[in-house]
């Protein structure tokens, strides 16, 4: 599952983005990848591991909601269980 959120840029700045990706790992756990930065510039990637899909999905939804409160807009969602 993958979500892409963008924030409206201020005058003369590149738009900021946050990409959230949820994927299973080789050991039966799940990981949440959070990449953020400015479009066309440097970005930061954080990885958090979770023991099961339910807790990883809850973390993804919590992070998504936090970004929406900061003014980001959901522009792309991919995956059968993509939260709306």
Image (cartoon, rainbow, N blue to C red):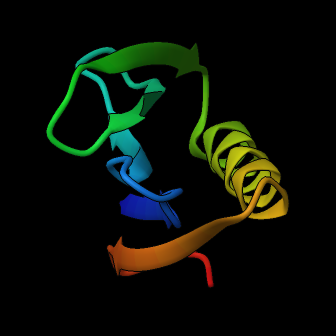
In which image quadrant can residue 72 be found?
bottom right
In which image quadrant can residue 38 be found?
top left
Front one among 82 and 44: 44
Front one among 51 and 77: 77
Residue in the picture at 38% in, 47% down: 13
Placement of the N terminus among the 4 image quadrants: bottom left
**Residue 50 on image: x %, y %:** 60, 22
- The reply, left or right, for residue 55 in relation to residue 47 is right
- The reply, left or right, for residue 81 in relation to residue 38 is right
Asked if residue 81 is positioned above or below residue 39 in the image, the reply reads below
Asked if residue 43 is positioned above or below residue 61 in the image, the reply reads above
Name the outermost residue toward the front. Answer: 12
Residue in the picture at 71% in, 44% down: 63
**Residue 45 on image: x %, y %:** 36, 18
Q: Is residue 13 visible?
A: yes
Asked if residue 55 is positioned above or below residue 83 in the image, the reply reads above
**Residue 23 on image: x %, y %:** 34, 41
Residue in the picture at 36% in, 52% down: 12
- The reply, left or right, for residue 64 in relation to residue 75 is right
Asked if residue 72 is positioned above or below residue 25 in the image, the reply reads below
Q: Is residue 82 visible?
A: no
How many marks do you count on the picture?
A: 0
Name the outermost residue toward the left. Answer: 40
- The reply, left or right, for residue 60 in relation to residue 42 is right
**Residue 69 on image: x %, y %:** 85, 60
In which image quadrant can residue 44 be found?
top left
Placement of the C terminus among the 4 image quadrants: bottom right
Residue in the picture at 61% in, 21% down: 51
């Amino acid at each position: 599952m993958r979500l892409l959120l963008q924030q409206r840029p201020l005058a003369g700045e590149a738009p900021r983005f946050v990409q959230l990706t949820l994927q299973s790992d080789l050991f039966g756990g799940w990981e949440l990848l959070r990449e953020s930065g400015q479009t066309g510039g440097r970005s930061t990637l954080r990885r958090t591991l979770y023991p099961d899909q339910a807790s990883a999905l809850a973390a993804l939804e919590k992070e998504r909601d936090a970004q929406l409160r900061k003014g980001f807009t959901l522009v792309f969602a991919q995956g059968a269980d993509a939260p709306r």
